Image (tube, helix red, strand yellow):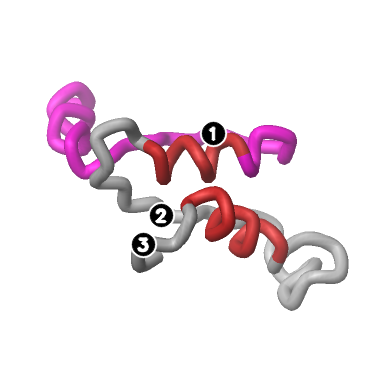
Amino acid sequence: MFRDDPAHAAAAFRSHPEPGGRFAGAFAHVVFGVLDRTRDSAVRTAFERTSADLPSGPTAISSSRTAPAAADARG
């Protein structure tokens, strides 16, 4: 999102697979890749808050700052 409000962007993405949304019932599982280069993780936090009440399965959250460390931890 090009300097859009992260909460607004997250809400827009969430609305599509929900009942009444353009892709309602089209997918059994949806994954959003969120690139967040903000110092305070504002973009990732907005997506996490917006989707906090949704059912979830195994998830992994990483940012461009931590992805190499996460890969190292897996061996």
SS of the residue under disc 2 = loop
What residue appears at the point 20 percent right and 32 percent down from the top-left corner? 66
SS of the residue under disc 1 = loop
What residue appears at the point 53 percent right and 44 percent down from the top-left corner? 47
Q: What is the distance, in whole Å, between disc 3 and disc 1 at their CAs?
A: 30 Å
For marks 3 and 1 on the same chain, the one whose residue lies earlier in the sequence: 3
Residue 58's tag is: 1
- Give the magenta range: 50-75
Q: Do labels 3 and 2 touch, CB within 8 Å?
A: no
For marks 2 and 1 on the same chain, the one whose residue lies earlier in the sequence: 2
Could you tell me the amino acid type at mark 2? Gly
Could you classify mark 3 by the number of other residues whose Cα lies within 10 Å: few (under 14), some (14-19), or many (20 or more)?
A: few
Could you classify mark 1 by the number of other residues whose Cα lies within 10 Å: few (under 14), some (14-19), or many (20 or more)?
A: few
What residue appears at the point 24 percent right and 34 percent down from the top-left corner? 39
The part of the image, by quadrant, that contains residue 26 is: bottom right
The part of the image, by quadrant, that contains residue 50 is: top right
Which residue lies under the disc numbered 3?
3
Residue 33's tag is: 2
In this rendering, the label closer to the viewer, 2 or 1:
2
Asked if residue 73 lies left or right of residue 59, the reply is left
Q: What is the distance, in whole Å, between disc 3 and disc 2 at their CAs?
A: 17 Å
